[in-house]
Image (cartoon, grey):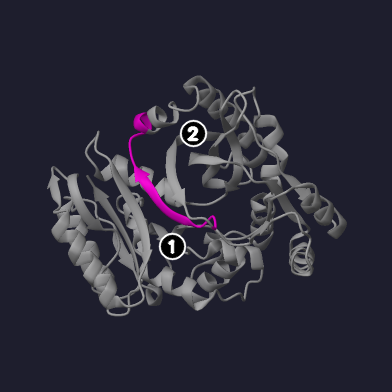
Amino acid sequence: MNFQQLYILNIDHDLSLANGNENYMSPDSARQMNEDLALLPFWYAMPGSSVLCASAYNLEFLDEMQEAFGLIENPVTLTVPCELDDGLCRKIVPWGWNKALRKRLLNAGIMERDVPSLSVIDRLRSLSHRSQAVNILPHLRLNSSFCGDSRFLVTLEDCRNYVLRHDSCLLKAPLSGSGKGLYWCKGEFTRYVSGWCDRISMSQEGVIGEPIYNKVMDFALEFQSDGIGHVRFVGYSLFKTNKKGAYESNELLSDAEIECRLSQYVFIDDLKLLRHCLEKKLSIIFGNDYSGYLGVDMMICSFEELPVYRIHPCVEINLRMNMGLLARFLYDRFLISGVEGKLRIDYFMSNQDLVRYHQIMTERYPLLIKGGKVHSGYFPLTPVAKPDCLYLASAVVL
């Protein structure tokens, strides 16, 4: 029987996982993003695999990218949804597993042997709960160069007391998407805050409470779990979020350069100590129950007393593929060593605005590729020509 590795971009995974229902349908904006960015797995898929997405625009763009980067001997191909019921034995590699994706694939013809069971997905949902980060955080404050505190608030009274004890704090839904499920409080437990906490606690067992830190920099340590007990470090991620905590962009840099930038604030030895500690802790918690990539988001925070800069070692744990890993793969596979750049996901009010942005960036930063590696310039990571496209993933190398 033929075997195929099939990659799927379900970037609405966090929303679906939080909902927990196999019949969940994400909002229009999330479905639009899934469709517009469906080819993103091309940049991290293994050679000879396939990406699930429809439309001739995707096929045309894929062919252009593989020709531009010289990837023609063992190319990534497309699989359209109507071709799934074909008897192939597949390894499915989604952005993340949830019940809604499982049901969608089964309805499309994927064999049940090729998807996780409902009990396995229930376990993954439990492991994705932000209380995991709360539990591991105390074990990662390895010395005075580390900071961080978070609490899992189970009752409404717990939430009230936590908010009133802090001049400002952040409440988080234990399961939510990037920049979603966050509530910023200013020391007042209003009726609206109470209602929000009550709704979240009813569906997700509680609420996460965190103090507000003076953040200097967002970064992450990225890992891969083999599913048989071992989690290994695979690279760094340096990224930016907006004031609401939603993802904005990733720096395209070598691991060595990211370490260099972090070392302006903290000791490299502390980062390496944290990395080794996380490999052990994550292996115990996730190593036997999860196979795939995961990221641990962190911050550099500043304080008035010494040490002025400290590492918050576990803001949250993302048990799925993430933009930091995409940036790592993109840099290591497609960029010449030593360059610097940026990876962005942008939303446009119209496809005309998207195309205009693409044209401006193409003229301003002409693309130079030699030997299959980008030396400089701008290039899209997803199709531009699709008429109703509103989301664009792109990279620029300076």
Q: In which quarter of the image is the C terminus?
A: top left
Which residue occupies the foreground of this view, 342 or 79?
A: 342
**Residue 131, percent across and down?**
71, 48
Q: Callout 2: 10 Å neighbours few (<14), some, many (20+)?
A: some
Question: Is residue 242 shown in magenta?
Answer: no
**Residue 351, percent across and down?**
29, 76
Indicate the quadrant where residue 6 lies.
bottom left
Which residue occupies the foreground of this view, 202 or 365?
A: 365
Q: Give the range drawn in magenta.
A: 244-257
Q: What residue type is labelled 2?
A: Phe
Mark 2 or 1 closer to N-term? Answer: 1
Contact? badges 2 and 1 (CB < 8 Å): no
Identify residue for label 1: 9
Which residue occupies the foreground of this view, 86 or 384?
A: 384
Question: Is residue 245 shown in magenta?
Answer: yes
Left or right of 49 on screen, residue 120: right
Indicate the quadrant where residue 57 lies.
bottom left
Distance CA(mark 2)–CA(mark 1): 23 Å
Which residue is painted at 78% across and 62% down in the image? 201
Report the number of numbered marks. Answer: 2
**Mark seen at residue 351:** none
Q: Residue furthest right?
A: 157
Identify residue for label 2: 233
**Residue 182, percent across and down?**
63, 59
Q: What residue type is labelled 1?
A: Leu
**Residue 302, percent across and down?**
56, 34
